[in-house]
Every structure is written in structure tokens, then in C-alpha cells.
């Protein structure tokens, strides 16, 4: 009865683990969850006030498919101010979260057997989106010694006549690594004289640490501007995960037109009230809230690193952004699913197995939770590893 493409989709492992942890908590179990990829901070007051004002003004009607003019202008302003990117409002579409932006782009770009290059480890949804479009995910392993980032040389070897799209994610999930400008320029040079579209997922762009600079791929030069779809949203840096506000911008008029048609025949506009609520987050009214959150995450990262450094037989990359740690447990257990299930059963700590990110023998923790829970949870993990058999 079901289509083949619907049956190839796998459940999101991060959402599944988070759901299981919540179920166990509801049963009274003392669960510490490091699984969810969402800030534990409340949505900034300016965003809430804008939503309330929109409701009271009766802004609950349908809007234009790509978004109201005010929010498109706000995205345009944000991209210019933060990323040195010049887009017309007609080149912007707001979507139901950055995941929706990515999904629609892949549906509009990828046909059967088209190849999409995905660096590993990857965010769990990238390959599933490609498979749903009947495309072929082509994985390039980001080596631990390179901060799990791919090199221009690796990219060049992976490109074939069937390559349609390159996925880029910086700062990345699950690593928290950041591509430096020099690295991006080297990648950009390889892409010259090709028709490869870059989907640049920049959802964690305002969460960087140790004064590490963030560079938008599209901002490098005229060629990258033309070939890149800049994708972002407010789930992470705006503490708005459940509000579902994402956006995309592209100079590719055919793609923008196709996405508008697809969205018009699926969701139509995104929630009208949330469009108004997003404006203060995009125009800078919440910058101090975001910076407060960023500083807290950096402090939590340091707390976690201090504890992890004392645990034998593991290794990890010091994240420069986002709010994750990707921990190598290959000296202890190569089957990450087995390790994580036992950890949840025996020590009541929920983490995400690395196999879901394309790298077995690792697990991911999110430190988007309190310092007390970080300390308590990592102490349980240390105990679990010491006694593991």
C-alpha cells in the first residue's frame, strides 16, 4: 500500500531517544537526558510580546506563501548585518523550521540517482531527505584529526557527473566544529566550473566559542553567492525550537520559484503569528538574550570537558560551536547503539548513538542543560564506563 520512498525513511534517532527519555521520566524514573538538540532557555520576552501583539491585532489570516513583507525584510536585514550577504526579499522564503527549508530544497533539486555529497558525521536527517527524493547520499568521512571536517582534496575525489548537491553544516551537529574561511575558500575553488548547489546549514551560527569566527559560505565570493542556498532559523539561536521558524535565501530564481510552488501546495504560509514573532529576533532586539545564552553554553562546555578529560579510554573533539560533544568510545565498545541502550538502562542517562550520525563507536551528548545535570550525568557515564563489560 505504501510508496517505496516512504518506506525507506528511518525514524529520527535523536527524536526517538528524546521521546523514550521523556516516557521514562513520566514513569518516575530519574532520567538525565543529553539527547535533545534544543536550548533549555526560555524564548526571549521580545519575541513573546511580538507574538501576543500579533494575536491581539488579529494577525491570524493567511499570508503570502514566502512570508509577510515585514519578516522577509527582517531576514534580508539580518543576512546583510550578520553575514555580509545581499539578498532581495524576493530571494527569501520563510519555512517551518530549517529542516523544512532543507527538505524543500532537496525535493526541488534532487531526482532519482542524483548524488548528494554529505560529510560524516552528519545530522541524522540529511541522508533521509536525500533518500526520500530518490537521490543517492555520497558520504565523505570527516577525519577526527581534521576536526571531523572534510578537505577540498576529499571533495574533489567524490565529485562525479551525477553530483548535484553538497551539504555543508558549520557550526556542525553532532561535532560543533567550524570551517575556517581558508578551508571554505579551498572547497569553493573545487566547486568552480561545476553546477553543484551548496546547501549551507547555518542554524548554529551565533553559538561559537573561544572567539572562533563564523563565515557564511555564500559570502566568500560571487561564485559561492550564486551557487549557495543559505539556510537558517531561530530554533537554536533564538531559543524558539517549538515555534518552527526557518528561512532560506538564494540567488537561484528557478529554485526559489520551485520552493514557493511546493510550499504553496503543501503548508502554504507558515504560521502567521510566528512570522511577526520572529521579527525582533532577526532585527537584533534579542541579541543580548542570545549572547547570554551563548556564554552559558560556553561555560557548560568547559564544565563538561573538565570532567570528560578524566575519563579513561575515550576521546573527543573540543567543540567550537553548537552545544554538542561527540565522544569516541571505540576502545570500549564499537556498537554505539548497544552502549547507549545499556547506559540508559543501567545509569538512566540518555545520549544519542553515533551510528545515527553515520559514525559507529561514538555517542553524542547535548550540553544544553544545567551545569548540575551535566555534572551529575557525566559522573554516571564515568561510572558506567569504568564498570563496562
Image: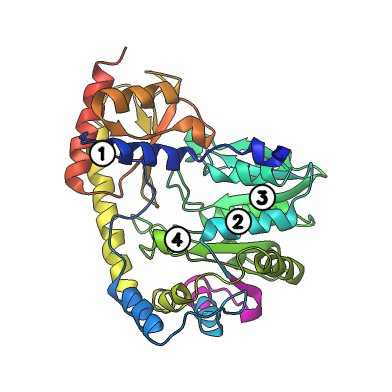
| Highlighted magenta segment, given as a residue range | 78-93
The residue positioned 43% from the left and 85% from the top of the image is 58
Question: Is 87 included in the stretch rendered in magenta?
Answer: yes
User: Looking at the image, how many numbered discs can be counted on the residues?
Assistant: 4
Where does label 3 land, which residue? 166
Gap in angstroms between the C-alphas marked 3 and 1: 39 Å
Task: Give the percent coordinates (x, y) of residue 375.
Answer: 19, 39
Q: Give the farthest residue toward the right.
A: 161
Pointer 2 residue:
102
Q: Earlier in the sequence, mark 4 or mark 1?
A: 1
CA–CA distance in space, label 2 to label 4: 16 Å
Choose the circle earlier in sequence order: 2 or 3.
2
Q: Secondary structure at mark 1?
A: helix
| Label ID, residue 95 | none
State whether residue 88 appears in this view: no
* N-terminal-most mark, 3 or 1: 1
- In this orientation, does residue 210 appear? yes
Which residue was labeled with disc 4? 205
Say which of marks 4 and 1 sits in front.
Answer: 1
Q: Residues within 10 Å of mark 1 (few under 14, many from 20)?
A: some
The local secondary structure at tag 2 comes to: helix
From the image, tell me which residue sits under label 1. Answer: 25
Question: Sequence order check: which comes first, mark 1 or mark 2?
Answer: 1
Amino acid at each position: 500500500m505504501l510508496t517505496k520512498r516512504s518506506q525507506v525513511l528511518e525514524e529520527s534517532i535523536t527524536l526517538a531517544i528524546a521521546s523514550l527519555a521523556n516516557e521514562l521520566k513520566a514513569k518516575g524514573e530519574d532520567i538525565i537526558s543529553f539527547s535533545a538538540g534544543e536550548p533549555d532557555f526560555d524564548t526571549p520576552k521580545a519575541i513573546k510580546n511580538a507574538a501576543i501583539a500579533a494575536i491581539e491585532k488579529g494577525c491570524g489570516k493567511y499570508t503570502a506563501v514566502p512570508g509577510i513583507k515585514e519578516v522577509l525584510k527582517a531576514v534580508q536585514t539580518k543576512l546583510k548585518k550578520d553575514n555580509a550577504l545581499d539578498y532581495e526579499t524576493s530571494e527569501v522564503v520563510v519555512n517551518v523550521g530549517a529542516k523544512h527549508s532543507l527538505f524543500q530544497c532537496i525535493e526541488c533539486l534532487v531526482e532519482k540517482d542524483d548524488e548528494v555529497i554529505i560529510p560524516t558525521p552528519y545530522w541524522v536527517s540529511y541522508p533521509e531527505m536525500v533518500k526520500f527524493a530518490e537521490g543517492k547520499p555520497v558520504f565523505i568521512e570527516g577525519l577526527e584529526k581534521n576536526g571531523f571536517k572534510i578537505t577540498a582534496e576529499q571533495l574533489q575525489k567524490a565529485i562525479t557527473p551525477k553530483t548535484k548537491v553538497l551539504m555543508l553544516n558549520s557550526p556542525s551537529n553532532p561535532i560543533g566544529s567550524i570551517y575556517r574561511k581558508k578551508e571554505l575558500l579551498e572547497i569553493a575553488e573545487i566547486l568552480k566550473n561545476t553546477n553543484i548547489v551548496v546547501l549551507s546549514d547555518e542554524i548554529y551560527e551565533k553559538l561559537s566559542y573561544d572567539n572562533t569566527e563564523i563565515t557564511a559560505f555564500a559570502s566568500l565570493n560571487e561564485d559561492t553567492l550564486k551557487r549557495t542556498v543559505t539556510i537558517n532559523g531561530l530554533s537554536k539561536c533564538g531559543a524558539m525550537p517549538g515555534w518552527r521558524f526557518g528561512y532560506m535565501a538564494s540567488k537561484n530564481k528557478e529554485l526559489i520559484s520551485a520552493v514557493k510552488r511546493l510550499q504553496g501546495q503543501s503548508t502554504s504560509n507558515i504560521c502567521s503569528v510566528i512570522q511577526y514573532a520572529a521579527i525582533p529576533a532577526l532585527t537584533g532586539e534579542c541579541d543580548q538574550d542570545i549572547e547570554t545564552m551563548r556564554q552559558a553554553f560556553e561555560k557548560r562546555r568547559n564544565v563538561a570537558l573538565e570532567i570528560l578529560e578524566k575519563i579513561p579510554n575515550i576521546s573527543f573533539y573540543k567543540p567550537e560551536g553548537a552545544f554538542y560533544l561527540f565522544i569516541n568510545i571505540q576502545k570500549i565498545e564499537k556498537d554505539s547503539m548497544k552502549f547507549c541502550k545499556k547506559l540508559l538502562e543501567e545509569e538512566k542517562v540518555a545520549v544519542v548513538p553515533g551510528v545515527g550520525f553515520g559514525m559507529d563507536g561514538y555517542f553524542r551528548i547535548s550540553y544544553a542543560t544545567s551545569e548540575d545535570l551535566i555534572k551529575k550525568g557525566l559522573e554516571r557515564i564515568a561510572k558506567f564506563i569504568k564498570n563496562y563489560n
